[in-house]
Image (cartoon, rainbow, N blue to C red):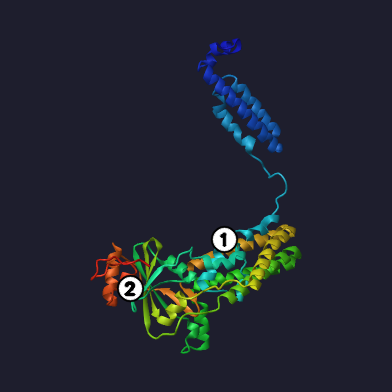
Amino acid sequence: MLPSVYQKQYSSKAFRYGPHIYITGSISACLLKAVCRLTALFFDGYSYRAVATLQATQQRTTMSPFSFLSFDFFNQLPLIFRTSSIPGPVTLEAAGLLVLADLPAVILRTALTGGASFLDAFVLVPGMHKQQSADEINRGEFPTTGAMTSGYVFRVENPATVNYLQNIGQTGCLVTARVSQSPSQNTDLSLQKRVLQSLFLSGVRATVLYFLCPISTIAVFALLGIIGDWWGFGALGMLVFGRLINVIVIKRRSQQGWKGAIEDGDGDLLILLSQDRWVRLQGSINDLKAVTSGQWLRDLSAAENFAVMFATTVVYTAAIVAFNASTFGSLLIGGLLLCSVALLTLCNSLTQCFKMYNCIVRMDGKPVRYRRRLEMAEKLVDESKREDWAVGMGLILPKHSSNRPVAV
C-alpha cells in the first residue's frame, strides 16, 4: 500500500508508468542532482549556470520519472561541463620526470651496435639509466644450434645475437643470415672509404636519425644558455654526466674475451628459436664464434657496480633539479626527451644489420616457408651431406636405430 502522496501522484496521468518505475526515476534524479552540484562546484566559473540548469531539470523531473532523459536536459550538458580555461596556471615542472620512463630504446641500441660510443652520452632518452640491463634483451632464450659442417650441437650464448635473430626470424620460415668482417677491417679500401662505409653501415636513414639525437641535445644546451635558465642547463648536464658513466661501463664490459680456438674454413649453423623460427647463419668459423660464443657483457665489478648506482642516482637527481627550470626550459627538456626517443626508436627499426666485435650480421635473401619442420631438416641434411647434427638437435630420427635422440 503506497502513502497518500504517492497514491495521489500515481493516480494522475503523468505517473501512469507504475510506482516502482516512478521511485526509480526519483532516485536517479537525486543522484543526478548530486553529480551536477559537484560538477558546478568544480567549475566555479559556471556555478550559477549549472545550478540554474539543475533546478530547471529538477522541475521537469517532478512531471515524469523519465524527464531527466529528455532532449532539453542533454542540450544543457555543454553548459555544465564547458570551461574556457583550466583552473590554475599551466606548469611543466614535471617534464624532467620523463627521463625515468622505462623505455627500451637505449637497451636495443646497445644490443644492435654491440656496445656504446662516447657520442651516445649526448643521446638523452627515457630509460637511459637501464642501459646495463642490455644483457637481458634475449628474454632468457639461448637457442639450440647445430653446426652442419662439423656435426656439433651447442647453444648461442650471446644475448645480443639472439635478440637480432629473434627480430629477423619468422614462424615456419627459414631465414638465412651471413656474418662478415666490418669494412673498417678491410685493408684493401682506402681510409676515407673505410670511414664512410663504417659510418653508414646501418643505412643512410638510420645514421641520419641517430646523429639528430646528439645535435638536438647540443641545440637545447645552447638555447638554455641563451635564455639564462641555469637550473635547466644544470639538469641537462647531469643527464649527460650520468649517461657518460653508463657508456664508459658498457665499453669496459663489452671488450672481447674468450671466443675459443682460431680455426680456418667456413661454417654453417642452423639455429632453432622459439615459436618455430629457424635461422641459418653462415660465414667464416672465427666470425661465427665471435658473434655466438663466449660472453658479451661481463659481470659488473665492484667499482663498476658503484659507478652504475651513482649514475642512476644522478639521473634521478637531475629529474628533481629540473623542477626548478623555467617553463620554457622545462618545455625544451621534455621536448628533447620525447624527440630523442622517437628518433632513436626509428633508428633502431631502420637499422639494417647487427654489429658485434668488428663483425657484421646481415639478412641474406628472403625467408623460405616450409609446411613442416621435417621438410626443412631433410633439405638441409641433403645439402650438408651429413645428419648427425640434425639427430643431435632432435629434428630427425637416426636411420639405423629405433631409439629417439635426446634433444639438447
Q: Residues within 10 Å of mark 1 (few under 14, many from 20)?
A: some
Q: Residue 244, relative to residue 190: is it above or below?
A: above
Q: Residue 134, relative to residue 286: is it above or below?
A: above
Q: Which mark is residue 403?
A: none
Residue at x 45%, y 65% (from the top left corner): 141
Quadrant into which the C terminus falls: bottom left
Distance (Cα) linking label 1 and label 2: 40 Å
22 vs 321, left or right, is left
Q: Earlier in the sequence, mark 1 or mark 2?
A: 1
Q: Which residue is mark 1?
A: 103
Quarter of the image where one finds residue 98: bottom right
| Residue 34 in sight here | yes
| Residue 351 in sight here | no
What percent of the width, then of the height, locates residue 364?
A: 38, 74
- Amino acid type shown at disc 2: Trp
Residue at x 57%, y 61% (from the top left corner): 103
What percent of the width, then of the height, locates residue 147?
A: 36, 75
User: The residue tagged with tag 1: helix, strand or loop?
Assistant: loop
366 vs 73, left or right, is left
User: The residue tagged with tag 2: helix, strand or loop?
Assistant: helix
144 vs 196, left or right, is left
What percent of the width, then of the height, locates residue 74?
A: 57, 32
- Amino acid type shown at disc 1: Leu
Q: Which residue is mark 2?
A: 389
Which of these two is toward me, 61 or 127?
A: 127
Quadrant into which the N terminus falls: top right
Which of these two is toward me, 345 or 54?
A: 345
